[in-house]
Amino acid sequence: MKPNEIVVQNFLSFYKLYRNNAFRKIKEFLSNQKEIFYENKISELQNNGLSKEEAVIKTRQGWVSVVSRSLEQIIEIIICDFCNKHKLKITNDKILKSKNLDEELNLVKRAILVDFGENCVLPDGDIIIYKIVEKRVKILAILSIKNSFRERYTETPYWKLKLAENNLTKDIKVFMITLDNDDEISFLGVNPKKSRIVMEYELDGIYLAKESFDESDKIKSIDKLIDDLGKLL
C-alpha cells in the first residue's frame, strides 16, 4: 500500500477505538503517524545509501505529500455517511481538471468555474459536495483542507470572494478544514493574527481537527462540520 493508504487504514482503526472523539484527535493521530513514517522512511533511505541528513530531508518532503492526501481522505471518511444518507456526491478539483469528464462531472465543473473575462478558472477545491436535482447540478459546498498555512492563508478567502462575485456561484459555501499546526488561527490572544481575522471574516466556516483552540461562531471543532452541512440541504 501507498503511505497515505496505510495512514488512512490506521485511522479507521483509530476511529473504531475513539468513535466521534476521534475527529477532535486527528492532529494527535497524525503526529503519531508522522513519527512512524519518519522512523521507517529514514531507515529505508539510509539502507539505500543516503546519509542521515539526506534521508531526513527526503523524508520530510515525502511526509508533506502523505499528510496532505491522508487528511483529504480522512475528511471524506467523516462526511461519507452524511453524503450517502442525503444522496450527495463528492469530487475534487484534481478530477475536474481531467480532459475526459463524463457529462455529470462536466456539469459540476461548469457550475464552479470562476470567470476572468477571456478565461475561466477552476477554484481550489479539495472536496466539492454536490447533488443532482432534476438532472441539474447544485453545488452545496467547497471544502479546502490544509495541514498548515504559513503565508497561504489568503488562498481560500480569495476563491470565496471570486465565487461571490457571480450570481451563478454566489451561494456556494466555502469551508476550511485544518489542523492549524502553526497556530495561525487557533488562538485569539491579545491581538488576533491577521490570518484569523481575514479567514474568519471571509469564509463560511472553519473547522479545526484539534482539541485546543478558541472557538467562535465560525471557527469550530471539526465534529460540527456535519451539522453545518446539514443546514445547506
Image (tube, helix red, strand yellow):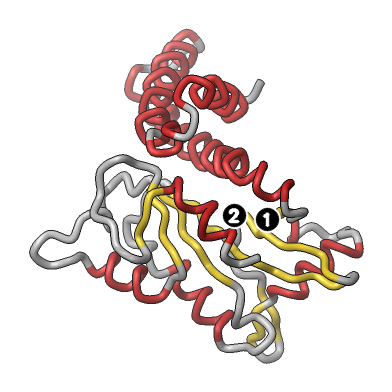
Q: Quadrant of residue 96?
A: bottom right
| Position of the N terminus by quadrant | top right
Q: Is residue 32 above or below residue 178?
A: above
- Judge from the rendering whether residue 105 lies leftward or rightward of residue 222; answer left or right: right
| Mark 1 surroundings within 10 Å by alpha-carbon count, few (fewer than 14), some (14 through 19), many (20 or more) | some
User: Could you tell me how far apart the alpha carbons at marks 1 and 2 are, in whole angstroms?
Assistant: 5 Å
Q: Residue 114, how many percent across, how many down?
A: 65, 79
| Position of the C terminus by quadrant | bottom right
- Reading the image, the residue beneath label 2 is 126
- Judge from the rendering whether residue 117 lies leftward or rightward of residue 223; answer left or right: right
Q: Residue at x 35, y 60 (%)?
A: 219
Q: Is residue 66 above or below residue 223?
A: above
Residue toward you, 114 or 167? 167
Q: Is residue 214 above or below residue 40?
A: below
Residue toward you, 85 or 121? 85
Q: Is residue 81 above or below residue 133?
A: above
Label of residue 144 in the image: none
Helix, strand or loop at label 1? It is loop
- Reading the image, the residue beneath label 1 is 92
Could you tell me the amino acid type at mark 1? Answer: Asn
Q: Do the CB atoms of the residues marked 1 and 2 lie less than 8 Å apart?
A: yes
- Judge from the rendering whether residue 139 lies leftward or rightward of residue 162; answer left or right: right
Q: Residue 46, how many percent across, how many down?
A: 43, 12
Helix, strand or loop at label 2? It is loop
In this view, the residue farthest toward the left is 190
Q: Quadrant of residue 76?
A: top right
Label located before the other in sequence (1 or 2): 1
- Judge from the rendering whether residue 185 lies leftward or rightward of residue 172; answer left or right: left
Q: Residue 15, how many percent across, how many down?
A: 51, 26
| Mark 2 surroundings within 10 Å by alpha-carbon count, few (fewer than 14), some (14 through 19), many (20 or more) | many
Could you tell me the amino acid type at mark 2? Answer: Asp
